């Protein structure tokens, strides 16, 4: 019995060994990642689906709207009607990021290809759901470059808002077909007739063109899909021309590398073909072609007019350049007209909590920047915080979402400094002193603030802000804008209850708390949108922090002259609370040049040297001991070093 058991075990081991040898495991050891890649890419291309549809039956469109007007809910109904997902399968299916579900807003444009049958013919609808907040306008810009039309969604209760106006003129400027849709007609306080009049007065839209729906209940959503087919024109493409593709989005996969989302302007591509990047000049072999439905569906080929993903073993994040044109290898083409890269407006320093985490944080930032091309990145060094980066964002919410994604998706916990903007200065160089010629420099870090003696002019970035507010809140909103150094441009009343205000505002005044204060003053009814308005001459000063006469460069900041004194007092009080007490007195001073604007004294630790005197002791003896203690503290203050732990800098510099 024992012999049979051993023979069976030996036979079983021999059988498994043969299986492992056939699979290649017995020849050499392979990593789990390599095996996963081999199995993933060993799929025969003949198994991929072939989906070729005439360009005349392709529609590329985006959904644009103000925040919380129902874009993602409408996209869910489209997915259900076309059979891409089951009914009631979830809320905001295209909002895949954790930060989107937590905040309840869309921060990343999402693409999905839908099959829709209209009058017996099958159509391909390439839908792009875009964000609504002004800080993510770059996502809207990139999405519209691959579209021929848009659905403009307006809330039936709130009506036209600031971002509604901005999105309309953005699509209008690109000559896209606009389908106006009034959503949330099922609400108790909905007034679609009032919203129709607003669309007529502001955008000259006829009432016959407006579709009234309820995306939540699915009322009239099918009419929107029919309007997409009948009103939006098909893409003007040619399958016979050489392949041209525009990269308008990308993200990183740990196994497949950088994945590019492209719009095929001409020709077609297939798996195993060689493509070349016009920007980098590098060539790659196409390993996969994918349609998003919304889950990935591998196809053998993509054709002109379609929107799909290309996986070509692109390992470097920098190679997937947003706005790049790709073409077949050795078949050169002209670059496609894409979109102008947006300029970062708010800058902040990001540092690792410990320098041992520098490499992991750098990899996380680079991969996230690949997915969010609106973020600019440069290396920065701080004596207090070490080696880090200076990142540029489109706004404060953009910065908060980026940092939250770093923590959630890459488990990073960076230190984020207070946000600032980019200033300009005209200075007179040494070679231009005689001729009095000035050269222009830019800076966004107080450490790079130029010497005021050689500066002929300071300039700060300005924005053109559009505020839509109910009439009864007009007074407080005007006071707020004037307090933020705003200059009124226009005032227009487009209905009986609301007014459109336009102010030119300094960007530095609105990036921190302007939006929150605006919402508080208007009970949440005001909406705000802004756009770049160039630079304007201003008066800037650098606030320096001195501890016992020693300047601490890392704590410096740049402010406007009229804000200098108030800001100096706030900073001195904050430092008084944060800096740990020492054995000697610390004089905290905030100065502009040689002029002290604010001062606070941090009291030292004090020992009761008179405690050993019995019954209070002699008066002269008490005075002598206290005088000796004071002289010792004075000598210690002259030679003692102020110890500022790293946590102090973090508390002061962070938002």
Image (cartoon, helix red, strand yellow):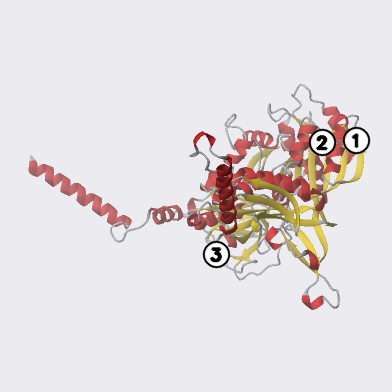
Query: Where is residue 24 shown, x and y percent of the image?
Result: 32, 58
Q: Is residue 466 left or right of residue 140?
A: right
Q: Which residue is mark 3?
A: 284
Q: Which residue is mark 2?
A: 160
Q: Quadrant of residue 293?
A: top right
**Which badge, 1 or 3, is on the more N-terminal residue?**
3
Q: Is residue 133 above or below residue 322?
A: above
Q: Is residue 79 left or right of residue 300?
A: right
Asked if the residue under mark 3 is in contact with the one under mark 1, i.e. CB atoms within 8 Å, the reply is no
- The residue depicted at 38 percent of the width and 53 percent of the height is 32
Please state which of residues 574 and 521 is positioned toward the viewer in this rendering. 574
Secondary structure category for the residue under label 2: loop
Query: Where is residue 51 shown, x and y percent of the image?
Result: 59, 49
Asked if the residue under mark 1 is in contact with the one under mark 2, i.e. CB atoms within 8 Å, the reply is yes
Residue 494 tag number: 1
**Which badge, 2 or 3, is on the more N-terminal residue?**
2
């Amino acid at each position: 019995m024992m012999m049979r058991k051993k023979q069976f075990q030996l036979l079983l081991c021999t059988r498994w060994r043969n299986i492992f040898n056939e699979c290649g495991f017995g020849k050499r050891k392979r990593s789990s990642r390599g095996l996963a890649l081999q199995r993933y890419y060993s799929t025969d291309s003949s198994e991929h689906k072939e989906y070729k549809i005439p360009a005349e039956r392709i529609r590329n469109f985006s959904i644009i709207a103000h925040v919380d007007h129902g874009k993602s809910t409408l996209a869910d109904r489209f997915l259900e009607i076309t059979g891409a997902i089951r009914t009631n399968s979830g809320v905001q299916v295209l909002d895949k990021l954790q930060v989107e579900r937590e905040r309840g807003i869309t921060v990343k444009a999402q693409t999905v290809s839908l099959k829709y049958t209209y009058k017996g013919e099958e159509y391909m609808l390439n839908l792009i759901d875009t964000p609504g907040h002004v800080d993510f306008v770059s996502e809207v810009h990139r999405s519209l470059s691959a579209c021929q039309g848009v659905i403009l969604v307006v809330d039936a209760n709130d009506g036209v808002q600031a971002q509604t106006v901005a999105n309309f003129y953005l699509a209008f400027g690109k000559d896209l077909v606009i389908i106006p849709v009034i959503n949330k007609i099922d609400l108790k306080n909905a007034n679609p007739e009032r919203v129709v009049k607003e669309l007529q007065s502001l955008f000259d839209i006829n009432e016959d063109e407006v579709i009234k729906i309820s995306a939540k209940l699915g009322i009239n959503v099918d009419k929107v899909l029919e309007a997409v087919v009948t009103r939006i024109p098909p893409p003007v493409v040619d399958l016979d021309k050489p392949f041209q593709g525009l990269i308008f989005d990308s993200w990183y996969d740990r196994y497949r590398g950088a994945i590019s989302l492209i719009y095929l302007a001409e020709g077609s591509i297939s798996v195993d073909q060689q493509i070349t990047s016009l920007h980098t000049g590098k060539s790659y072999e196409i390993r996969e072609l994918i349609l998003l439905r919304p889950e990935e569906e591998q196809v053998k080929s993509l054709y002109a007019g379609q929107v799909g993903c290309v996986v070509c073993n692109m390992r470097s994040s920098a190679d997937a350049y947003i706005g790049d044109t790709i073409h077949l290898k050795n078949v050169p083409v002209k670059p496609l007209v894409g979109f102008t890269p947006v300029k970062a407006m708010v800058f902040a320093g990001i540092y690792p909590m410990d320098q041992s985490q520098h490499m992991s944080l750098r990899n996380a930032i680079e991969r996230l920047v690949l997915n969010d091309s609106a973020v600019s990145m440069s290396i920065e060094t701080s004596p207090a915080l070490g080696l880090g980066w200076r990142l540029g964002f489109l706004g404060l919410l953009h910065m908060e979402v980026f940092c939250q994604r770093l923590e959630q998706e890459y488990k990073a916990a960076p230190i984020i400094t207070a946000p600032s903007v980019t200033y300009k200065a005209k200075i007179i160089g040494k070679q231009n002193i005689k001729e009095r010629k000035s050269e222009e420099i830019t800076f966004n870090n107080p450490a790079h603030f130029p010497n005021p003696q050689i500066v002929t002019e300071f300039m700060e970035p300005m924005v053109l802000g559009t505020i839509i507010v109910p009439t009864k809140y007009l007074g407080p909103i005007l006071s707020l804008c004037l307090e933020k150094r705003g200059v009124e441009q226009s005032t227009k009343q487009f209905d009986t209850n609301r007014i459109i205000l336009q102010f030119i505002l300094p960007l530095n005044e609105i990036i921190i708390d302007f939006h929150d204060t605006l919402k508080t003053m208007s009970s949440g009814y005001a909406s705000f949108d802004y756009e770049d308005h160039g630079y304007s001459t201003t008066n800037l000063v650098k606030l320096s922090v001195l501890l016992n006469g020693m300047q601490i460069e890392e704590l410096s900041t740049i402010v406007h002259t009229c804000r200098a004194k108030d800001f100096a007092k706030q900073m001195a009080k904050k430092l008084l609370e944060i800096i740990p007490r020492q054995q000697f007195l610390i004089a905290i001073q905030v100065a502009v040049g040689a002029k002290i604007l604010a001062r606070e004294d941090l009291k030292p630790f004090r020992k009761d040297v008179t405690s050993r005197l019995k019954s209070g002791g002699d008066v002269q003896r008490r005075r002598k001991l206290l005088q000796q203690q004071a002289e010792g503290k004075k000598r210690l203050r002259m030679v003692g070093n102020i110890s500022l732990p790293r946590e102090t800098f973090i508390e002061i510099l962070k938002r």
